[in-house]
Image (cartoon, rainbow, N blue to C red):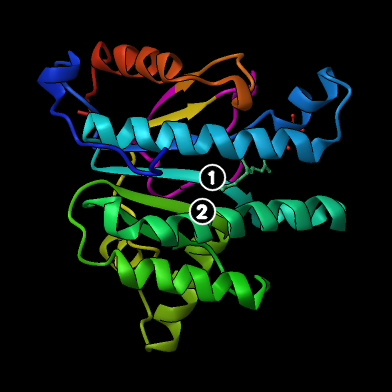
Amino acid sequence: MALFGRKKNSGEVGFKTLPEHIGIIMDGNGRWAKKRGLPRTAGHKEGAETFRRITRACVNLGIKYVTFYAFSTENWKRSPDEINAIMNLFKDYLLEAKRDFEKAEDTRLIFIGEREGIRADILELMDEAEERTADHKGTTVYLAINYGGRQEIVSAVNKLIKEGKEKVSEDDISGNIFTVPDCDLIIRPSGEQRLSNFLLWQAAYSEFWYSDVLWPDFTENDLYSALKAFENRNRRFGG
Ligand code: FPP
């Protein structure tokens, strides 16, 4: 099946209002595998399939931006085997995406996070994916790899210091972090209710939606439940 789907409009899918930007913390792969007596890497493999399915669902819904938290700066503490398995899953996805760019219609891929530390073969595919989809104007899929929200802010401040700034404004920070828009809805499956260093700056006014479902079991219907809940939230942005 093609990686990317066909855009529908929100009326067609029955939502009164949709978030412009959804952030998704893909959690629970390890527990999913453990429950089945499988190695953790089997959970990540299944989690990568869920990622493909949910990306397609977001594209079909016409979501403008979706950010997936795939690998945090803290995830380097895991065993080399597990890290390598996750990196190989990225590579498989990027190779598959590469075959699909022409069919990707207007889906754009952008990677956020520190590039340092990521294998050269993967970096090359990441650069190619960003270049080949740069003028796609539909759903933008941000993949957070080697990403940490605090590091993102610190590095923005350091850039500003280097430029000679003595005092920084919100706009200065916003203009120097990864160019990800403010996040409207954060989805976290697997029963944990924390942000884990994800989109700290962009989540200032995010709505949160949690579920006990482990990421490999997360379906389009879970996404729709989150969107239904979002539809009924009363967002006041502090006003
Ligand atoms: C968190 O679950 C998951 C990760 C740290 C890795 C997420 C990676 C994927 C879903 C595969 C990514 C592949 C592509 C193509 C984007 P956990 O391992 O911490 O689960 P646990 O809390 O149950 O142990």
Whether residue 184 is visible: no
Which of these two is toward me, 230 or 99? Answer: 99
Q: How many marks?
A: 2
* Quadrant showing the N terminus: top left
Magenta segment range? Answer: 189-208
Residue identifier under label 2: 144
Spatial CA distance of label 2 from label 1 is 5 Å
Task: Assess whether residue 184 is covered by the magenta stretch.
Answer: no
Which of these two is toward me, 52 or 199? Answer: 52
Horizontal relation, residue 122 to residue 58: left or right: right
Mark 1 CB lies closer than 8 A to ligand 1: yes
Which of these two is toward me, 143 or 48? Answer: 48
| Whether label 2 touches label 1, CB < 8 Å | yes
Horizontal relation, residue 105 to residue 174: left or right: left
Q: Residue drawn at (68%, 28%), measured in percent from left and top?
A: 28
Dot 2 crowding, Cα within 10 Å, few <14, some 14–19, many 20+:
many
Task: Assess whether residue 201 is covered by the magenta stretch.
Answer: yes
Looking at the picture, which amino acid does disc 2 mark? Ala
Residue identifier under label 1: 69
Q: Is residue 48 above or below residue 124?
A: above
Mark 2: secondary structure: strand
Point out residue 201 in the picture as x, y percentages from the top left corner.
Answer: 41, 50
Q: Quadrant of residue 66?
A: top left
Horizontal relation, residue 127 to residue 116: left or right: left
Ligand 1 quarter of the rendering? top right
Mark 2 CB lies closer than 8 A to ligand 1: no
Q: Residue drawn at (44%, 70%), measured in percent from left and top?
A: 156
Q: Is the magenta region chiefly helix, strand or loop?
A: loop
Q: Residue drawn at (56%, 68%), measured in percent from left and top?
A: 114
Q: Is residue 53 above or below residue 138?
A: above
